Image: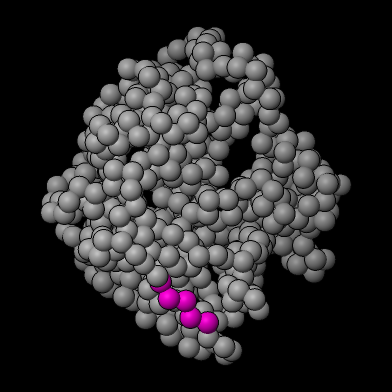
Amino acid sequence: MTQEQALNILKTGANVFLTGEPGSGKTHTVNEYIAYLEDHGVEASVTASTGIAATHLGGMTIHSWSGIGVRSRLSEYELDQLSEKERLVKRLTAARVLIMDEISMLSCDVLDTVEMVCRHLRRRSEPWGGLQVIFVGDFFQLPPIERRTSVPSYEQDLFVDLDAQEVESNFAYHAGAWKRAKPLVCYLTEQHRQEDGSFLEVLTSLRQGTVSALVREVLTSRKVSPEDDGITKLFPKNANVDRINDGELKKLHGQSHTYTMTSHGFAPVVEGLKKNCLSPEVLTLKLGAKVMFTKNSPEGKYVNGTLGEVTSFSRTSGQPTVTTRDGRSFEVSTAEWTVEDQGKVVAAIEQLPLRLAWAITVHKSQGMSLDAAHIDLSTAFEYGQGYVALSRVRTLTGLYLHGFNERALEVHPEVLEHDTAFRELSDDAETAFASLDQDEVESMQRDFLLSIGGNEKGGVGVSNKTQKVSTFEETRQLALDGHSLEEMAEKRKLTVGTILTHLERLIEEDALDAHADLAHLMPGVEAMAKMEAVFKKVQETEGKMPLSSARSLLKDAYSFDELRIGRLFVER
């Protein structure tokens, strides 16, 4: 199914499972739908199973949105407590469309709990309290983490045993909430990340569970050392990540700044908090240290997974200032992690919400798109780890593979079976919608918009919401005002990649003229001349301007984002 076909189905108000291979455009399609709703006066509730995934869509975690926090189940008492939270009730009552990204990492228990909260707080008995729900993700990605069951209830909802072996499938599609939603399956089949044909064949083979001798040979050929030691390193286990990070920290000159975790409360629960907190009990930082945030900022400055670098230390408080990859800087304050039972805090820990990040786990890389990565899969222990890690990289030349074991080449056998069914269901949905008259489809889309308080002509609907400017128009205005890509991304709370996608579309629709309106973004004269010559050469031979071909001819002298900027100024 194409992105356009999926988008047309989403607009009818049907519940949908939007899936596809990495790079097939799931996030892009969701962003298009969000923009469509905004153009018609409706604000979607955008959530994800992890903080990293949430930031790609400019949303929040489903746990925070629903108010369940770290819990996977709620007692009747806890559900009533949520009903007394005015802001939470107001948020869920006002919701019309609920989007849940990275659904593969959400357990069926959590999905059922969120659905129960929606019905209870919205005071509506229909599945999901009458919301349109959109599950987004790929079950070939990492599965939900299983939780221990041999601890008291208030601990059980928090403690995660990362070394636990899977006992039984806990995928979201087993949830009663999934079945009650009866989602149409939209399986995207286009590919927009891996423009390298041979690498795409490798990933497809892994996904289909048919790893041939040729695939093994290709992967073995990438057991090479990276030319740039500064590229991202991915490992399956935290122990390897910690070893790399500690080694890199020692290489830095300058004074060390050490921050020690504090705690209080019921000792066994405190120990559980410490074990599961991503920030270490003793954190040592220096100027230039690569770091990752381990908790969502209450003010929305960062989320769990945001990457940055320590650029200074306060002379008064001693707290570090971190500059994120998109250029934002702020002083980092101590954060608190707590466990509550019956409304009382039974344990709490305090530490800076940071950890070193020269290397990160495969788990934390999910959702990222990297120009290059040094990946060690020799200790892979979970289905999907190899596939997730390898599919982070755009091209085979950007892959530096230290090693791999047999588990790294395996995907979950149950998911393999369900994937076939999902593809067939998607074909059925595509055929069914293709058989409808265009007028009938447009009528369904119009009726849904009106039912959720939108306006078919755009702007304010019957809900009297303040009129929203199109997401593309907001980007257009910022570009016309002369803002840099980083400034636009910060103001829009989007990634630079999404801003570039907006600019590409605006140019394609003649809403912007690259040379007249975006001259401030144009690369230097020498760089632009090289890019233009290569893009024209590629276009002559391939009929289009794929970034990977241009980057290869330029011998990786420019990043993919730099090439995307340059391509804006090349006549097509």
Q: Left or right of 556: which side holds 384?
A: left
Q: Is residue 260 magenta?
A: yes
Q: Is residue 237 magenta?
A: no
Q: Is residue 329 above or below residue 25?
A: below
426, 350: nearer the viewer: 350
For image coordinates 25% across by 56% down, the residue present is 159
Estimate the x, y position of residue 569 in percent, counting from the top left. Answer: 77, 52
For this orientation, the residue located farthest to the right is 516
Which residues make up the magenta segment?
A: 257-261
Predominant SS of the magenta segment: strand
Q: Is residue 413 above or below residue 318?
A: above
Q: Quadrant of residue 286?
A: bottom right
126, 93: nearer the viewer: 93
For image coordinates 59% across by 76% down, the residue present is 318
User: What is the tally of numbered marks visible in this picture?
Assistant: 0
Q: Is residue 522 above or below residue 430?
A: below
For image coordinates 23% across by 29% down, the residue present is 176
For image coordinates 71% across by 31% down, the residue present is 469
Q: Quadrant of residue 428?
A: top left
Estimate the x, y position of residue 512 in percent, counting from the top left. Answer: 79, 40
Q: Does any portion of residue 31 appear in the rendered image?
A: yes
382, 95: nearer the viewer: 95
Q: Does any portion of residue 15 appear in the rendered image?
A: no
Estimate the x, y position of residue 275 in percent, counting from the top left. Answer: 29, 66
